[in-house]
Amino acid sequence: MTDLVLIEGLAVDAVIGVYDWEREITQNLLVDLEMAWDNRRPAASDDVELALDYADVSSRVSGFLQRRQSQLLETAAEELAADLRQHYGIAWLALTLRKPGAVPQARSVGVRIERGQKP
Ligand SMILES: Nc1nc2c(c(=O)[nH]1)N=C([C@H](O)[C@@H](O)CO)CN2
């Protein structure tokens, strides 16, 4: 059994893109995260210190993407996944990064990666 902590549709405005005009503006990114975490310990203690705090993770994700200003979604996703796993000690995560405005004919475009081993 793998417990998860979830973040869905976290909106972040950031500089991202490969074209010159994209370096001059911010664009909306949407982040979904599934993070493996043993939720039994925080459940038993009712202590947020033992939980993977989704508010804290959300804040770190926003700051990371706003600072990084990568060209590709792939680069942002890979580096963000590594940062979160290292900082919080997350054994496995799935990260979806969407750029809804990038292709007007599509509802959204993006990338999804999984990193680590499910415990
Ligand atoms: N697989 C990807 N394809 C494209 C990306 C990307 O990050 N990953 N980015 C672009 C441009 O920045 C695009 O979003 C501009 O509309 C094109 N293809």
Image: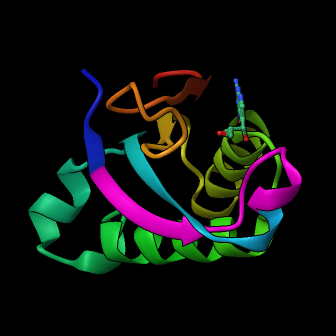
- Image check: 114 left or right of 12? right
Position of residue 16 relative to residue 92, above or below, is below
Q: Is 46 part of what is drawn in magenta?
A: no
> What sort of colour scheme is used for the picture?
rainbow
Q: Residue furthest right?
A: 20
Q: Nearer the viewer, residue 56 or 23?
A: 23
Where does the image place residue 72, in percent across and percent down from the top left? 77, 40
Q: Say which residue appears at 57% left-offset and 21% top-offset.
A: 117
Q: Nearer the viewer, residue 83 or 24?
A: 24
Rendered image quadrant of residue 64: bottom right
Q: Is 21 part of what is drawn in magenta?
A: yes
Q: Say which residue appears at 71% left-offset and 66% top-offset.
A: 15
From which residue to which does the magenta span run? 8-22
Q: Nearer the viewer, residue 50 or 73?
A: 73
Rendered image quadrant of residue 1: top left
Q: Say which residue appears at 84% left-offset and 47% top-offset.
A: 19
Q: Nearer the viewer, residue 65 or 86?
A: 65
Position of residue 48 relative to residue 68, above or below, is below
Q: Say which residue appears at 82% left-offset and 48% top-offset.
A: 71
Rendered image quadrant of residue 45: bottom left
- Image check: 21 left or right of 107? right
- Image check: 17 left or right of 106? right
Where does the image place residue 22, in percent across and percent down from the top left? 75, 58
Where does the image place residue 39, in percent across and percent down from the top left? 23, 50
Where does the image place residue 5, in percent across and percent down from the top left? 29, 48
Q: Quadrant of ligand 1?
A: top right
Position of residue 92 relative to residue 6, above or below, is above
- Image check: 27 left or right of 21? left
